Amino acid sequence: MNKFIVTGGNRLDGEITVQGAKNSVLPILVATLLVNGESVIHNCPCLSDVDATIRILEYLGCMVTREGHTITVDSSTINRYDVPDNLMREMRSSIVFLGGIMGRMGKAVLSTPGGCEIGLRPIDLHLSSMEQFGANITTENGCLVCSSDGKGLQGTRIILSFPSVGATENIILSAVLAKGTTIISNAAREPEINDLADFLNKCGARIYGAGESTITIEGVSALKPCEHSIIPDRIVVATYMIATMMTGGKICIKDIVPSHIGPIIQPLRDAGCIISVSGRNVMAAAPNHLKRIRMIRTMPHPGFPTDVQAQMMALTTIADGTSVFVENIFESRYKHVGELLRFGSKISVEGRMAVVEGVKSLNGAKVKATDLRGGSAMILAGLCAEGKTEITEIHHIDRGYDEPEKVLSILGADIKRVNKDE
Ligand code: EPU
């Protein structure tokens, strides 16, 4: 087991590009199941969640090759429709295989994904949507058995009670090859939904309105292979911007999609950061003193992303004054708070609300990554803390960040990945 050793105090400064988006590449790799032939996906980050997705595709009979950041999937050899429990459990978002396998095979057997570090994560919206396509769902020995009974999926109208990202993706995957038209109301509007629709439309799907609340999908009979490049990861952009702001530095991140990071720019400006966007580049410079951010409420896109809540909280631990967070998306996404306290920060949590009283400085600490984004918040706190920080359980961080130690070192950070026993 590896750990990160961070020696705080270096001011980050420099220019970087970021990896492709984890939350795009996962559903797009699943979507290759619907294509007859070889899909070529560029700008795929090297992440353990991507490895887990590839293992499932291979288990299903697909031929997968990887060269650098390009993954090629030939799904014409698919010969199974089940995903065993051990592979399902490797990655929470494996539920998106439900739509991919059902769309291609008309039946699917998957073990039920349990809760995870950030909450219970029920799948009721995924299952009720699948039933609306005419599928039968039963549970046998802890497995979901889903079948369209040889009739194929039928286009339908689905009104989501909450704009779930994964459920919207599953509906799109089920609808592209279904008979007739599907309309999703209250669909998720995250940029990763657009990326999935862009990929599928290049393959010949007819998806209209992705990125808006109403998405219309006209079923087609087959999809043809195409090449696609994954969008830059907006959460990773936010993470490195916040890291730099916490160390009093300045950063230029090139080749981003500015509209994707809109929701995090205003809170950073509220904290006193100077942010400018020029073309596909964003520049950020830290103020002499970070100011409090009065209130951060996580919301579905285009609201403030829950995936940046932990990192922004790390920033407010050293801001002047009191900041308040309300986590509206996941019910237990404050596991990082206990670890942030070890740095000498002042945070109290009451239900979905966290109150952060800024302190003058943090002290290096021995902490663990409690989950993916909580883990990245430990790196950020370590970078601005006095002295040494040791972060264990970094496999959580490797699920979503492609070699963060290398990217941060380019910016001047002192961070090393070492074997835990060293
Ligand atoms: N929910 C239900 N029932 C459902 C589905 C969702 O109650 O059937 C609830 C969830 O329990 C949660 C809320 O709805 O409380 C939001 O869940 P959503 O389905 O939107 O999230 P997801 O698809 O499971 C994706 C990202 C998450 C990100 C969320 C919200 C992927 C692979 N994961 O999860 O990413 O936090 O959307 O934006 O796309 C991360 O990258 O760190 C991460 C957790």
Image (spheres, rainbow, N blue to C red):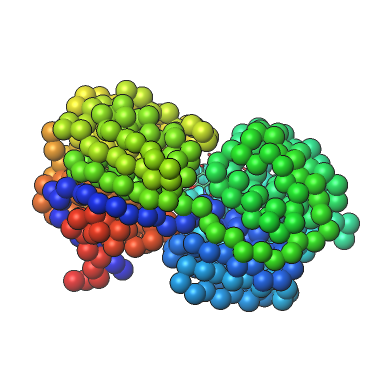
**The N terminus - image quarter:** bottom left
Q: Report the side of 402 relative to 251 (left or right).
A: right
Residue 143 location, x and y as percent?
Answer: 67, 59
Which sits in the foreground, 114 or 288?
Answer: 288
Q: Which residue sits furthest front?
A: 279
Look at the image and tell me in which quarter the C terminus lies. Answer: bottom left
Residue 336 seen:
no
Question: At 39% from the left edge and 45% from the top edge, which residue is drawn?
Answer: 281
Q: In which quarter of the image is ligand 1?
A: top right
Percent position of residue 153, x then y = 82, 52
Q: Which residue: 53% across, 56% down? A: 230
At x 55% / y 41%, what residue is drawn? 190
- Which x, y percent locates residue 218? 80, 46
Image quadrant in which you'd find residue 63:
bottom right
Q: Is residue 282 left or right of residue 127?
A: left
Above or below, 241 relative to 111: above
Question: From where the camera sits, is residue 322 visible?
Answer: yes
Residue 167 lies in quadrant: top right
Residue 169 x/y as whole percent? 64, 48
Q: Is residue 181 above or below residue 103?
A: above
Mark count: 0
> What residue is rendered at 70% in x and 48% in y?
172
- Identify the residue at the far left of this view: 387
